[in-house]
Amino acid sequence: MTLTDARSGPNDRLRSARLALRLSQEEFANKVQEAGQINGEPNECTKRLVQRWESGQTTWPRGPYARALETATGRPIERLGFVPPETRVRADGRGGHDVERDPAPGTDASIVPAPGSGGFGGIWLSTYQFFSSSREGTFTGAHFVLLLQRGSTLTVRSLPGAALSEGSVLTMDLTIDRNVLTGTWVEETSPSGHYRGARYHGAIQLLSEPTGLRLSGKWLGFGKAMDINSGPWELAFQTATTNKAAVDRYSCIPSLDA
């Protein structure tokens, strides 16, 4: 099915998911509202909005609604018949490139929706891979990090105790351009760890997936031989709540088995 075809007809997948729950459109709207409360992202879903989704008039819900729909149905948003806005890269005529998004009809988001009322703000799980010549292997560094957004800038700071990299402290400073995040990273390793307090830094660029629940990209940084190394980096959304209780809960060593 082409993008045009998907946008021209009703959303039978969403309707089937609702009917499988034996809910009317009004009852389903209430369930989506309840799911938003569970997610910590209250919404104002109505019967009319459900009708717009099922008729195909709105082909891609905003972030909080997408996440509420996933919670309400237990299915990924991509399996509920919605079509994400198309993202493409074009030359800017000056040797560089720009990222464009085609907003779906009936949506107001040319910017990728992000969790919570604070945009990308919240607590995320940060993981990256790197090769260590001194340890002769590839390793994963992981931290729970706090993201604070102010306009188009985003600061990232690791939470106390949230490290697998021997107690290292991670920071990032990013600039947001629609679904592209670009900036720098710095990691201060533990003085008592394998890297003996070494400071590493470099550049990073991330792309946000349509629901805003995951950021993925690559890092760049200098190696011992003055070569430039790179590797994958990913941030996975955990919660939009940033109060003391949430910070205390995530001030721990992340489990990568979940």
Image (cartoon, rainbow, N blue to C red):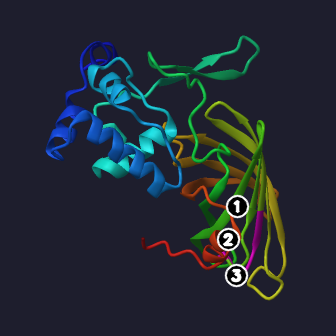
Mark 1 or 2 closer to N-term?
A: 1
Q: Is residue 197 above or below residue 217?
A: below
Q: Residues within 10 Å of mark 2 (few under 14, many from 20)?
A: some
Q: Can residue 79 be seen in this view?
A: no
Q: Name the residue under label 2.
A: 247
Residue stretch rendered in magenta on the structure: 162-170
* Percent x, y of residue 201: 81, 58
Residue 182's tag is none
Q: How crowded is mark 3: few (under 14 residues within 10 Å), some or many (20 or more)?
A: some
Q: Mark 3 points at which residue?
A: 166
The majority secondary structure of the magenta stretch comes to loop
Query: Residue shown at 74%/18% (left/top)?
Result: 95
The quarter holding residue 26 reads: top left
The quarter holding residue 183 reads: top right
* Percent x, y of residue 70: 36, 47
Asked if marks 1 and 2 touch (Cβ < 8 Å), the reply is yes
Distance Cα–Cα, label 2 vs label 3: 20 Å
Query: Which amino acid type is shown beneath numbered disc 3?
Result: Glu
Position of the N terminus by quadrant: top left
Query: Residue shown at 84%/74% (left/top)?
Result: 198
Query: Which amino acid type is shown beneath numbered disc 2?
Result: Val
Mark 3 or 1 closer to N-term?
A: 1
Q: Is mark 1 on a helix, strand or loop?
A: strand
Quick check: 224 left or right of 80? right
Q: Nearer the viewer, mark 2 or mark 3?
A: 2
Query: Residue shown at 60%/79% (left/top)?
Result: 253
Query: Which amino acid type is shown beneath numbered disc 1?
Result: Leu
Q: Name the residue under label 1.
A: 146
* Percent x, y of residue 50: 33, 30
